[in-house]
Image (cartoon, rainbow, N blue to C red):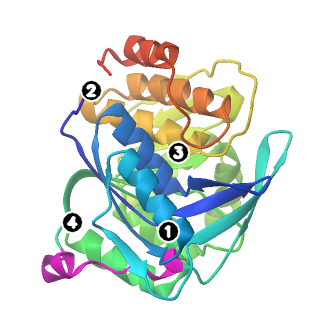
Amino acid sequence: MNTGKQVITFGEILFDVIDDKPYLGGAPMNLAGHMSKLGANCRILSALGNDELGKMALQKMRDLNIKTDGIHIHPSLPTGTVEVSLKEGMPDYVIRENVAWDNIQLSATDNDGLHFSSDVFCFGSLAQRTQNNKTLLHTILRNLSSGEIFYDVNLRRSYFTIEVISESLKMASIVKLNDEEVLFLSQWMFEQSLSTHDFAKKLIDKFGVKIVIVTAGADGAYAFNINDSFFSQSNKIEVADTVGAGDAFSAAFLFTYLHTENLQKALDAGNVMGAYVASRQGAIPDYSADLLKKLKGTTGLTF
């Protein structure tokens, strides 16, 4: 089903190397992959190297029906890679620096207008580790015609600053964090230990965020707006690996919210999708008929 919803993601495309095997990943890539599989029209603004991994990434994205015309092929920098080690299913990352996605460039056509239109524009913190990408992202967002701007905080060690997070929060209408990020940012930004509810309200009041999502793994997920709070309990699963599970949650949440504007349904759908991906190997596994049946029951949508 093609829903006609337009999605743009900005940032890293890379390969997670797990047990010496490369898996296409990066939060913007994973998010676009899942939303495309659900039926949205997805485009990525990113960069790849002129190498075998870059060619492999382009083919995999085309197989997922993701538009690749916004991807710059860098003549000298390699395609990004991340060494992933798993400890009891939880990933630890070593992210290679000075790679293609550190130097995202727009196509000549995009540069002429610097005006993008979408139902949701999605970005994170990691791709803003270079000045080139920060400047480009801010330029795009200043000229953006978008229904929602989704910021996945998605902190990675030493690759963020208080300035990057604050500026990103100011630009976003929907913000997603996990419970560990809430604890860390409560102290770092507000110098106090805040509950999930109080932290979310701080973001809404201080930065003008419309919706704050907090995922808590097996303990469920929360969403907050200026008036209400919502909770969805996670189903118990046997974890294979959690790589990409948060991005899968985001995709199902956004896809459902764009169609229903119902935060409870969106949370429920996010939990179903996130749990399913955590129970499978890889960030974008094939969907089972059982998963789609559960999503249909959760959201009332047809997939």
Q: Earlier in the sequence, mark 2 or mark 3?
A: 3
Q: Looking at the image, which residue is at 43% across and 12% down?
A: 293
Q: Are marks 2 and 4 in contact (CB under 8 Å)?
A: no
Q: What stretch is highlighted in magenta?
A: 100-114
Pointer 4 residue:
144
Pointer 1 residue:
54
Q: Do the residues labelled 1 and 2 touch (CB within 8 Å)?
A: no
Q: Do the residues labelled 3 and 4 touch (CB within 8 Å)?
A: no
Q: Can residue 134 be seen in this view?
A: no
Main secondary structure type of the part rendered in magenta = helix
Q: Which of marks 3 and 4 is nearer the N terminus?
A: 4
CA distance separating discs 2 and 4 = 23 Å
CA distance separating discs 1 and 2 = 36 Å
Q: Do the residues labelled 3 and 1 touch (CB within 8 Å)?
A: no
Q: Relative to 185, is 281 above or below?
A: above
Q: Can residue 164 be seen in this view?
A: yes
Q: Do the residues labelled 2 and 3 touch (CB within 8 Å)?
A: no
Q: Which amino acid does label 1 sit on?
A: Gly
Could you say where residue 54 lies in the image, as x and y percent from the top left? 50, 68
Could you say where residue 291 lies in the image, as x and y percent from the top left? 50, 19
Pointer 2 residue:
260
Taking the magenta stretch, the answer to whether it contains residue 106 is yes
Q: In which quarter of the image is residue 255?
A: top left
Pointer 3 residue:
247
Q: Relative to 7, is 295 above or below?
A: above
Q: Earlier in the sequence, mark 3 or mark 1?
A: 1
CA distance separating discs 2 and 3 = 20 Å
Closest to the camera, between mark 1 and mark 2, is 1
